[in-house]
Image (cartoon, rainbow, N blue to C red):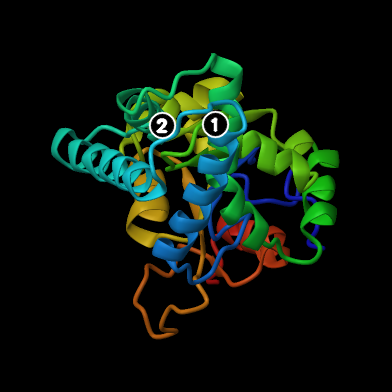
Amino acid sequence: MAADLRGTTMNAAIKPIDAILFDLGETLIHWGSIDRQRVFLRAAHRTYDLWAQRQQRMPDFHRYYMHQWFALHWGHLKQVVLRREMNAMRYLERACRKLWLMAPDPFFRELAWQWYQPLAEIATIEPGTHDLLESLSRRGYRLAIVSNTFVPGAVLDRHLASLDLLPFFPQRIYSCDIGYRKPDRRIFSHALQRVGVSADRAVFVGDLYPTDVRGAQRAGLHAVWKRPAHDQPTRRRPASTPAITQLQELPTAIDRLITGSAA
């Protein structure tokens, strides 16, 4: 592990780092290549079966599936046109009600989890992730998650808890909860306010260069690029932007960023 980046040996011209903000998908949690149609079909079967346990009169599965499918695609279209993040569960709830599938809020919260669970089942984290986060926490860094997602925050929190990651991140900023998404600087500003640090004392770690790295830098944060496994090694990037392929490289990358040495 690299030397403590909060020590007195760092470049005096650069302020110390107090917070590290992480992207979620393909940074902390990995799904790899996903067959979206297959995952959606599995989730539809799960949620249909959940409804069938509480309702005697059910629409046929194909009708249920198509209502949910069109609801999500309509939500995505509105998201693109309005440039506002969608919360998928709101659209799925409306689709259910159009089929006269009614239930109280606790049921819909469980329904949201069942929609997501096929993704949770195939998710992985890198070996050593817990040790790394524990080390960063012990050094006093404030850790947070800033994620572009239409999955309800409560569902992602449940997944993080199942992976024993939730305690490391007291602040979690999900785009579906606040309405705008990276690279919009407002989501970074919102995260910094929640964490309680200024932009120049925070580092953002993410896998999407234009969205995560450039977005964070435009908002005044430092950034570390977690290079995707499928990315071409020859891709051009500023020499001042450290790149890593595994989270275990993060302390050294931050050290290089602070001291101004090439990554």
Q: Is residue 172 visible?
A: no
Q: Residue at x 85, y 55 (%)?
A: 131
Left or right side of 46 for 150: left
The quarter of the picture where the C terminus appears is bottom right
Compared across the picture, whether 182 is left or right of 77 comes to: right
Compute the Cα span from label 2 to label 1: 8 Å
Residue at image mark 2: 176
Q: Mark 1 highlights which residue?
A: 153
Query: 120 above or below 180?
Result: below
Tell me which amino acid carries mark 1.
Gly
- The reply to whether callout 2 and callout 1 are in contact (CB within 8 Å) is yes
Q: Looking at the picture, how far across and down is residue 9, in whole percent?
A: 75, 51
Tag 1 or tag 2, which sits nearer the N-term? 1
Asked which secondary structure carries label 2, the reply is helix
Residue 189: image x %, image y %?
A: 42, 27
Q: In which quadrant will I find the N terminus?
A: bottom right
**Amino acid type of the residue that numbered disc 2 sits on in the rendered structure:** Cys
Q: Secondary structure at mark 1?
A: helix
